[in-house]
Amino acid sequence: MTALLQAEKLTIHRPGTADPVLHDVDFRIDPGEIVTVVGPNGSGKSSLVRALLGHMPLASGSVRRQPGLRIGYVPQRVHIDSAMPMTVRRFLSLPRKVSDAKAADMLREVGVEGVERRQITQLSGGQFQRVLLARALLHDPELLVLDEPTQGLDQPGIVGFYKLIEQIRRQTGAAILLVSHDLLVVMRASDRVLCLNGHICCEGTPEHVSVAPEYRALFGADAEGTLALYRHHHDHDHDHDHGPAQDHHHA
Ligand SMILES: Nc1ncnc2c1ncn2[C@@H]1O[C@H](COP(=O)(O)OP(=O)(O)OP(=O)(O)O)[C@@H](O)[C@H]1O
């Protein structure tokens, strides 16, 4: 299968220095895959994403994107000037104009129907993340890139967001590259997890990564809980679809 996006020996330096943020990272994502990048703060997750998208210069190595690849991107930080009024509708037409019908469809798809006239700055955190997702989906991406898309959401909000991501993958067949701290929830939605700390510490299926010594060394006690939760979800999901993790405390 041809990768949508592939990097070889990707190395990035801190600006103006030879100090590597990332070194020798090999990466690929295939059509329809959900790949999650985890790693501690400062481990280079956002830098990897920005380099893969061509937003950041490489010190060495290569990135190859399929020619004409349509990418939808939700960056980690979106600065909205609160002094400048901006409706959701206007925001969706930046930078590329979309029709009212398309905007309305997309807002409905992501579960925030009818918020067109609302001011961006007056949305809740969860509504704002969904509007960002709607904007990233407007031009039928083959690859959706989400950098910490659930920041500021509470646990049910996070679970709901990842369900939406899985649903989008099912409906559109888009590949999804996720950066996240929400190890517990993210694990379940991913086909492949890549654990980063300046380089790739380990990668593989969620179950493989959660028992890898490199992963455990990085995430300590949290790592144990991740595996327990992953197993729990995984077992149950074969039987029936049921509610989020916090409804079921199995120690
Ligand atoms: N524009 C920049 N100038 C200088 N250093 C930078 C810049 N961007 C990132 N860095 C450094 O690169 C390293 C990796 O940062 P990056 O944001 O990629 O990590 P991250 O894993 O996404 O972190 P977090 O989980 O905190 O978002 C950090 O040490 C950071 O200080």
Image (cartoon, helix red, strand yellow):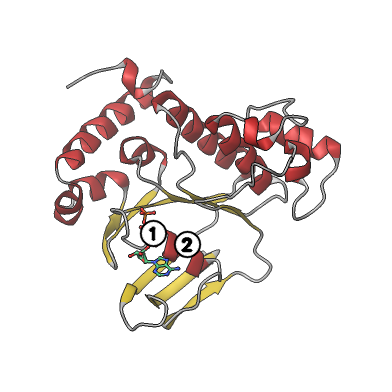
Could you tell me which secondary element the residue under label 1 belongs to? helix
Determine which of the numbered discs, if any, sits on residue 179 in the image: none
Q: Confirm or reject: label 2 Cβ below 8 Å from ligand 1.
A: yes
Q: At x 78% / y 30%, what residue is drawn? A: 117
How crowded pointer 2 is (Cα within 10 Å; few <14, some 14-19, many 20+) is rated as: many
Left or right of residue 13, residue 54 in this image: right
Residue 11 lies, with reference to residue 184, above or below; the image says: below
SS class of the residue under badge 2? helix
Within-10-Å neighbours for mark 1: few <14, some 14–19, many 20+: many
Tag 2 residue: 49
Q: Is mark 1 within 8 Å of ligand 1?
A: yes
- Residue 102 locus on image (x, y percent): 80, 39
Counting from the top left corner in percent of width and height, residue 166 is at 51, 37
Along the viewing direction, whichever of 225 and 236 lies nearer the viewer: 225
Residue 45, disc: 1
User: What amino acid does circle 1 point to?
Assistant: Lys
Front-most of residues 198 and 30: 198
Q: Quadrant of the C terminus?
A: top left
Please say if 76 is above or below 14.
above
Toward the viewer: 89 or 185? 89
**Residue at the limit of the structure toward the top, as seen here:** 247
Ligand 1 shown in quarter: bottom left
Q: Amino acid at mark 2?
A: Val
Q: Position of residue 32 (x, y in %)?
A: 54, 50
Give the Cα separation between the discs numbered 1 and 2: 6 Å
